[in-house]
């Protein structure tokens, strides 16, 4: 018991209905100290804390009667009684539902407060109990009011004061919103698509199934190249061989352009020197803990370096930008199994020379960049940050008013904490297996760059109650907690919500054209001005 307050009544087995139609057992207590009365609910100590975190159950809910307008006794039955607490500002806490000796506990609770002149029975409605203004006035005159703001540590060991009643109501509203749009937290157990399933002549149908179910891990090295346009959708070995030879020659022509630069040209070009320096630095520190990139003489590092150099020549408007290495390295991990005698052994069973392997990874990267419009994104990150994030915000806040209110009040509405994950297509944000599954859906979406915006909005919505429970909503705390959340969340729950948001924001919705607008290209970005955000 906290010093300075005493326990009046404590009721076990009380559900706090913060989630619609779900049990949420805990302990409800009434505390007093001098003139102050406080109700406090905590989850049952026997419950699994990891489950509580997953379900966004607050570790403690504390409300002073100074904040309550009235109490209503509802849903009376033989084995349960519920109390509804109305707050100032026309909001209402989720129901507290008593299950153990419900009539006895609720009667004692209300009778005590009536005796102490805290509440009075309504003359018109015998189940309604109004909090007396005389009680509130007496509290305002007390110097001890602030002594009863209780602090606690959340489940993540971040310091956080107790949730305000408004925050509790916001979490309840959040759960109601998810229920109303048809979101369910349970994972869908789909069997992923394998290469043996690709027997349909309509590749658009294959992509639809991949978007829904994902790709079996052993089949990604065979299917992703088709999505990137590196391999034709054909079983004709001769056609595939000719195509691979063609793209290898095209890659070698690009490399020749770089190799023909003289020492004087490089020495007199600060741009070329900067590109070389940044690529060398990024390659040396790229995923070195990963088995595919360990060791200073690792051929995958040489391949990564050459591919990035080639891209800076191939796309001169964009050139090389830090972060591109994070998008190439997963392709190396997915496609290349090992190196022997200077040759690359691919997971698809083929053996390629160094040049053929570089060409394959290079054109896969080019295909991925074009598919996601990241070649446009990297052209001008400052302008495109506003372009992307204002659309993410528009999607999320169109369905979630409490989120909009939080972002505005905490000055987080530029969503800067989400930009790095979105630039890297969520590389480093999710666990590796979850990332591959996410990329399956992004690469096969009807509009990959737009679906990424829905993924960002889904993350933002799922993050909302956790920001209330575990942080004080400062930018530093939000950035740290968002990173931790994405690393732990189950990707199927994100994809499920993103798909629901996308379906609800279909053609005819006022925001559809705005949300689905293509990113400005290399010339258009110079004329782009954000609709909602101010660029600094």
Image: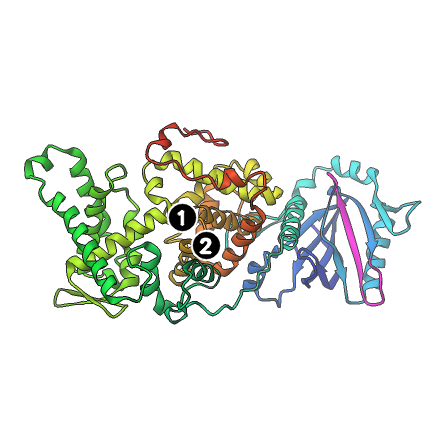
Q: Quadrant of the C terminus?
A: top left
- Image location (x, y in percent) of residue 220: 35, 64
Is 168 in the magenta? no
Q: Examine the rendered structure and indicate whether residue 47 appears above or below residue 420.
A: below
* Element carrying mark 2: helix
> Is residue 318 at least partly visible in the picture?
yes
Query: What residue is at 73 percent from the left and 62 percent from the top?
Result: 14
Whether tag 1 and tag 2 are in contact, CB under 8 A, the answer is: yes
Is 76 in the magenta? yes
Query: What residue is at 52 percent from the left and 68 percent from the top?
Result: 189
Q: Which residue is mark 2?
A: 486
Mark 1 vs 2, N-terminal side = 1
- Image location (x, y in percent) of residue 495: 50, 56
Name the side, left or right, on which 521 lies relative to 509.
left
Q: Which residue is mark 1?
A: 421
32 or 328: nearer the viewer: 328
């Amino acid at each position: 018991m906290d010093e300075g307050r005493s326990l009046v009544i404590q009721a076990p087995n009380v559900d706090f209905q913060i989630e619609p139609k779900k049990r949420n057992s805990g302990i409800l207590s009434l505390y007093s100290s001098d003139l102050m009365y406080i109700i406090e609910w905590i989850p049952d100590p026997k419950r699994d804390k990891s489950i509580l975190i997953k379900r966004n159950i607050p570790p403690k809910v504390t409300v002073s009667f100074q904040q309550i307008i009235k109490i209503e006794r509802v849903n009376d039955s033989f084995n349960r009684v519920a109390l509804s607490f109305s707050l100032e500002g026309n909001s209402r806490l989720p129901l507290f539902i008593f299950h153990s000796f419900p009539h006895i506990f609720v009667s004692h609770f209300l009778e005590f407060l009536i005796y102490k002149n805290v509440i009075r029975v309504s003359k018109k409605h015998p189940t309604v109990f109004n909090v007396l203004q005389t009680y509130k006035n007496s509290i305002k005159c007390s110097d001890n009011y602030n002594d009863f703001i209780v602090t606690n540590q959340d489940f993540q060991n971040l310091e956080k004061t107790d949730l305000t009643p408004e925050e509790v109501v916001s979490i309840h509203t959040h759960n109601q919103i998810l229920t109303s749009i048809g979101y369910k937290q349970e994972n869908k157990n789909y069997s992923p698509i394998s290469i043996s399933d690709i027997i349909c002549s309509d590749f658009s149908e294959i992509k639809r199934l991949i978007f829904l179910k994902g790709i079996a891990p052993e089949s990604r090295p065979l299917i992703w190249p088709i999505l990137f346009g590196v391999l034709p959708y054909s079983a004709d070995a001769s056609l595939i061989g000719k195509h691979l030879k063609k793209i290898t020659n095209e890659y070698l022509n690009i490399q020749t352009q770089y190799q023909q630069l003289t020492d004087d040209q490089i020495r007199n070009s600060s741009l070329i020197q900067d590109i070389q320096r940044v690529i060398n630095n990024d390659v040396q520190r790229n995923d070195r803990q990963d088995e595919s990139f360990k060791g200073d003489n690792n051929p995958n590092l040489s391949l990564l370096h050459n591919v990035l150099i080639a891209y800076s020549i191939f796309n001169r408007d964009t050139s090389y930008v830090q972060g591109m290495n994070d998008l190439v390295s997963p392709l190396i991990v997915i496609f290349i199994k090992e190196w022997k005698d200077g040759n690359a052994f691919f997971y698809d069973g083929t053996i390629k020379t160094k040049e053929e392997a570089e060409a394959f990874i290079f054109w896969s990267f080019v295909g991925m960049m074009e598919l996601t419009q990241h070649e446009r994104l990297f052209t001008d990150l400052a302008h495109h940050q506003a372009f992307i994030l204002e659309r993410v915000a528009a999607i999320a806040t169109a369905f979630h008013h409490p989120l909009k209110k939080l972002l505005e009040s905490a000055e987080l509405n530029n969503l800067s904490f989400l930009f790095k994950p979105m630039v890297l297509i969520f590389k480093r944000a999710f666990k590796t297996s979850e990332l591959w599954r996410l990329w399956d859906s992004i690469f096969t979406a009807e509009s990959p760059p737009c679906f990424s915006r829905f993924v960002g909005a889904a993350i933002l919505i799922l993050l909302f109650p956790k920001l209330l429970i575990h942080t004080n909503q400062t930018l530093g705390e939000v950035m740290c907690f968002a990173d931790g959340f994405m690393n732990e969340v189950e990707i199927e729950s994100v994809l499920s919500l993103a798909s629901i948001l996308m379906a609800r924001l279909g053609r005819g919705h006022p925001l559809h054209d705005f949300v689905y607008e293509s990113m400005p290209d290399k010339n258009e970005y110079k004329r782009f001005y954000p609709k909602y955000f101010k660029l600094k």
